[in-house]
Amino acid sequence: MSIFKNPFEAATRGNYPLAIYIGKQHRDSLFVDSTTSPIAKTCYDLVVSKVANLESAEGDFLSQKGTQGGKVATFKELETGMSITLGEWQTEIKHVYKVNSIEYKVLFPNGNAPFTKGQQQHKMDAVQALLKSIGADLSLATIKIVIQAFYDAMMLAFKTKGTSKKSTKVDSLAVEIARKDLCDVMEGNFGKLIDFYNKTPMYAAKYFDEPAMRGRLQKSFMISVNPMKTKNVFTRTFANPDTQELQFTNLTNAALRFFLTDIKTSSIGLLYIEVPAMATVTRLLSNCGNPATQTFLKVMNADLHTAGKCRVKVL
């Protein structure tokens, strides 16, 4: 591909869900650093409205198609999964605050009922109140992004229900314009970040999900490794590497070690995770090394005789 072509526009052409996904990943990863990094704040301010415009245009388009018999995500569908969604939020929050702590009780003063019972508006108010309670708490910044995205989906579903039918052609054009606007800003942000991190461009990688743009985003990896051998699991950058969790399942009758390196041929260092035989553990990616500069996750089988097998899941 020519270096003068916009890679974000090319990767998302004809694929609006992908455009929304990489736009949100870019926005959310910038948001995490926006309070401590001026360049992240600058880029976040530029892209946040573009993502919102694309989501809104896509929502209008899907809503219009829904009036013609297509399947559309509704507020009712969001409500149906609310208990599971709330449980996922609370699991993440419990990693920071214990259930009986004052901080946790401030977030959920009335328990789960406001989120799962009552009128739709009341449920939206409960989610909004949770977001306000989290506020600028940096320890909950990552989960706040997830909650905000869910609240945005609730708002979109609530606003579009019962709307009148619009022209498919007009709505489709609006989505395409919004996609291109987002891609233009992302290309501009890419230039700004690469200029800022010109000596260490890898530091800019976390703001862009390159594997997703290549259409090879993968969540689960099954790996076999011979005795006394090391094997690459994946090469990946993450939006929030310091808080990214991985689930390691060792399907071997011997311990396996997982570690990060900066190049594929590097050997194991001082920092690694050892997973016992036939065990499953969940650990931070940063426990394996420095994910900001080390993007290769590798597994080592130090046993002399036993062939290794494992599964690594990106959570």
Image: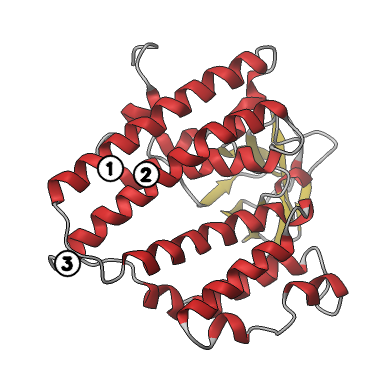
* Circles 2 and 3: CB atoms closer than 8 Å: no
Q: Earlier in the sequence, mark 2 or mark 1?
A: 2
- The dot on residue 67 is 3
Residue shown at 45% from the left, 66% from the top: 154
Q: CA distance from mark 2 to mark 1?
A: 6 Å
Q: Is residue 195 above or below residue 305?
A: above
- The dot on residue 175 is 1
- Image coordinates of residue 10 in percent, x first then y, are 32, 27
Q: Amino acid at mark 3?
A: Thr
Q: Is residue 154 above or below residue 237?
A: below
Any part of residue 263 in sight:
no
Mark 1 crowdedness (10 Å alpha carbons): few <14, some 14-19, many ≥20? many
Q: Amino acid at mark 1?
A: Val
- Image coordinates of residue 262 in percent, x first then y, are 68, 26
As rendered, which of 228 and 195 lies closer to the eye? 195
Mark 3 crowdedness (10 Å alpha carbons): few <14, some 14-19, many ≥20? some
Q: Is residue 79 above or below residue 151?
A: below
Q: Is residue 222 above or below residue 185?
A: below
Q: Quadrant of the N terminus?
A: top left
Q: Quadrant of the C terminus?
A: bottom right
Q: Amino acid at mark 2?
A: Leu
State which quadrant residue 146 falls in: bottom right
Residue 186 as seen in the image, left or right of residue 274: left
Q: Residue furthest front?
A: 164
- The dot on residue 54 is 2
* Circles 2 and 1: CB atoms closer than 8 Å: yes
Residue shown at 52% from the left, 50% from the top: 221
